[in-house]
Structures are given as structure tokens and as C-alpha cells.
Image (tube, rainbow, N blue to C red):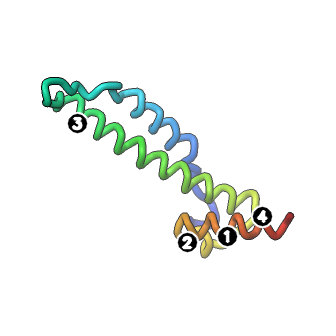
Amino acid sequence: MADSYFFNMEKLSLNVAKEHIQMMTEDIGYCDNFFDEEKLVNNLKNGFVALTMLNCFVESFVNSIIDSCMKYDEEVLLKCSIEEKIEIIFFILWKRF
């Protein structure tokens, strides 16, 4: 993050995940104790991309909460793990109520 500007990945990562989920097939072509290798590989590749992008979405969403809603402008908290960020967010919100 240079000069406290950052690129919000929420919309992009969610769109990429949706696109790759749509490319997956509903069945993996299992019959007679054999898999259709092409369908299986297709689902694994697209599922991997979708899960990775959903992870990016969650991380970006949590960073947006920290940056905009909590008005936290230092990079220290943004460099924490996702688990630490969520704990801090809930701790701060709990203190407000």
C-alpha cells in the first residue's frame, strides 16, 4: 500500500469466482467405476480458481471494513492474518455496544 491507496479486489474476485463456478460441470462423468478425466480436471481447475478468488474476496472485504468503517489508517493491522483481523473487528464492535 503506497500512500494509503489500495486496489479493492472485492468486485473483481467475486466476478472471477462466479465465472469459474459457471464453467464447472454438475457431474464428473462417473460411470462403470471410472471418472471422465476431462470433466474431473475441468472441475478441479475451475474450483481451485473459484475458491482462491473467494478467499481474496473475504480478505478484501475485511480490509475494507478495517479501512473505511473503522477509520483505521495504519498498515499494521492490514498486515495481520485474516483470523486476527476478524477477532479485532469483533472485539472493537463488541466494545461499541
Q: Which mark is residue 88?
A: 1
Q: Amino acid at mark 3?
A: Val
Say which label, 1 or 3, has the lower sequence index. 3
Q: Residues within 10 Å of mark 4 (few under 14, many from 20)?
A: few
Q: Residue at label 2?
A: 80
Going by the picture, which residue comes out furthest to the front?
Answer: 32
Q: At label 1, which amino acid type do we have? A: Ile
Say left or right for 3 vs 97.
left
Q: Name which residue lies at 14% across and 30% down.
A: 33
Image-based side of 48 in relation to 10, left or right = left
Distance CA(mark 3)–CA(mark 2)? 34 Å
Circles 1 and 4, Cβ within 8 Å, touching? The answer is no
Disc marking residue 22: none
Quarter where residue 76 is shown = bottom right
Mark 2 and mark 1 residues within 8 Å of each other at the beta carbon? yes
Quarter residue 65 falls in: bottom right
Identify the residue at horizontal 57%, vertical 41% (top origin).
11
The answer to which of marks 2 and 4 sits earlier in the sequence is: 2
Residue beneath disc 3: 41
Real-space Cα separation, disc 3 to disc 4, in angstroms: 43 Å
